[in-house]
Amino acid sequence: MRVQLLKICHARSGDKGDSANIGLIARKEKYYPLIEKVVTSERVKAHFEGIAFGKVERYEMPNLWALNFVLHQALGGGGTRSLKNDAQGKTLGAALLRMEIEIDEAMLEEEGTHHV
Amino acid sequence: MKSSIRIASGQGFWGDLQTAPLDQVSKGPLDYIMMDFLAEVTMSIMQKQKRRNPEAGYAKDLIGYIDQILPLCVERKIKIITNGGGANPEACAEAIVHLAEKKGITGLTIGIVSGDDILPRLDALREEGHALANMESGEELEPVKQRILSANVYFGAWPIVEALGLGADIVVTGRTTDTGLTLAPMIHEFGWKADDWDKLASGTVAGHILECGGQASGGNFSGDWRSVPNLAHLGFPIAEAYPNGDVVITKHEKTGGLVSLQTVKEQLLYEIGDPRTYITPDCIADFTTIQLADDGPHRVRMSSVKGKPATEFLKVSMAYLDGYTAIGTVTYCWPDALEKAKAADQIVRTRLAEQGLTFEEIRTEFVGFNSSHGPLAVTHGDCNEVVLRIGVRDHNHKAVESFTKELAPLILTGPPGATGFAGGRPKAKEVVAYWPALIAKGVVRPSVTVRKV
């Protein structure tokens, strides 16, 4: 079945100059191998088309069940130069949680519908 | 040696929660309180204040906080460490001395860490061959040199350790790394050595967790945010540090908020790049080695952190003027809110073009529709209301000024249902851009002094 990442992950994002970083964290350990497999830097780059204009780097942190993405040229110049309402990329973590992925229904079984 | 020390975060940025410092020193046991005031553009604001008044240029809020917490800190032997000295740590220390005298508090030692300001030495440093090229873009400094407002190196924990060694009860610094404020008391209390890389890395990671205040203890938590109790009385995080480098992240009992594996993880991932090389002046921390474990309610134990030797460089942070921006908003109501806001945007752009006004960038966002998620935003029928938000940026101040006059006329000359203009015209603001660079360690030395009251 298809679910949004919101269902199995949480995220925090922030800025460094004109780059944004997004920490994507699996809600449970069992979801980490799945996100590591499917949430690739290429997919994230495509997801943020029209928002992030530079390269997207991905770093794996299995110890925290997390992936860290660095999105270059994502903040309209960054800092006080940026004309964006979200000049610091605070909302980009939530934007990544909109991404839909395919997941085995059995894996989700014990989850409530709370996060849909 | 103490078997453990408790270091509290009292402030995550200049303008953070005003009740936090007093809550931290009054609501439970504590050995140190650290307060971070400096973001990347903060130093340039403080430098400007100092130019106008030689006794200004530090975080004035800090004096108010010290006024509140000093009696309790003296009574409970809690030490205060802060980079709120900003562009003028000496004047900040002077204000604290006055405050202590006024309150009749004596026997106090105040440590001052300065020497981070290299603005007066910039030409000399460049003549000596320190290029100070932009470490991200590689650009040469020359074209922006005349527009530099502030230039500071980031010192790490060691100058603070020196001040604590001289008996300081309060340490006031200029541009010190946020993480150094938390690491320093661990080095001081546990006698860690300059090459105890793993322990220094652990203290650095603890500093990273504490440096954004409530963001580690339930604030801005994107997991099950509804599950965070009592955000109105959010307890700021506390690092309970042990001599072997282990750190328990916690908060005072009977405060709001949440310290959990999830809240700590979110903060660990905040504003980092390559997690294997988190670089500070004190060490390089490897975030992929961090082990977290549940240690009871509102307690997360961190262990096993690995570190590597520090680099041979200090980071330099410069701020320079780089043109002007102005951003204005107009609100459009139902019906057809989004369509009307889009029409209004076109009207403004037509009028600007006919006056021959062009800009390096003009950007339109529709708040309530797409300002956060841009092309990823989805519509759910007709919006109840939309805020049209137009911004321009240019080096030509006059052009930016002209733009500020183009929004108000929309109220009477554009689509219907426009409101929200009571604040008047938007203001043209200076762009203060950020120039990061590196300089060899040893070229810039910290100055550590103490004053006694």
Image (tube, coloured by chain):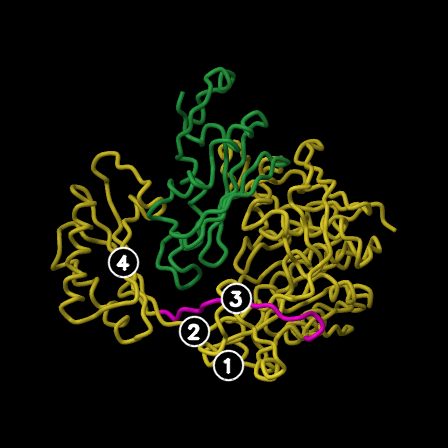
- Residue B144 higher or lower than B179, as above or below: below
Which mark's residue is nearer the viewer, 3 or 2?
2
Mark carried by residue B52: 1
- Per the image, label 1 sits on a secondary structure element best described as helix
Q: Earlier in the sequence, mark 4 or mark 2?
A: 2
Q: Name the chain letter of the residue that bears numbered label 2.
A: B
Q: Which comes sooner in the sequence, label 1 or label 3?
A: 3
Left or right side of A7 for B380? left
The answer to whether dots 1 and 2 both sit on one chain is yes
List the residue tagged with mark 4: B390
Looking at the picture, how far across and down is residue A101, in whole percent? 42, 28
Q: Nearer the viewer, mark 1 or mark 3?
A: 3
Q: Chain B, which colour?
A: yellow
| Horizontal side, residue B197 vs residue A24: left or right | right
Q: Which residues are magenta?
A: B429-443
Residue at x 62% of width, y 60% of height: B65
Of labels 1 and 2, earlier in sequence is: 1
- The answer to which quarter of the image holds residue B3 is top right
User: Residue B255: percent from the left, percent from the top?
Assistant: 62, 40
User: Which three-letter amino acid code belongs to the residue tagged 1?
Assistant: Arg
Where does label 2 land, which residue?
A: B321
Give the residue displayed 64% in from the left and 36% down from the top. Answer: A63
Q: Position of residue B374 (x, y in %)?
A: 32, 46
Residue B293 part of the magenta-drawn span:
no
Contact? badges 1 and 3 (CB < 8 Å) = no
Asked if the stretch drawn in magenta spans residue B441, the answer is: yes
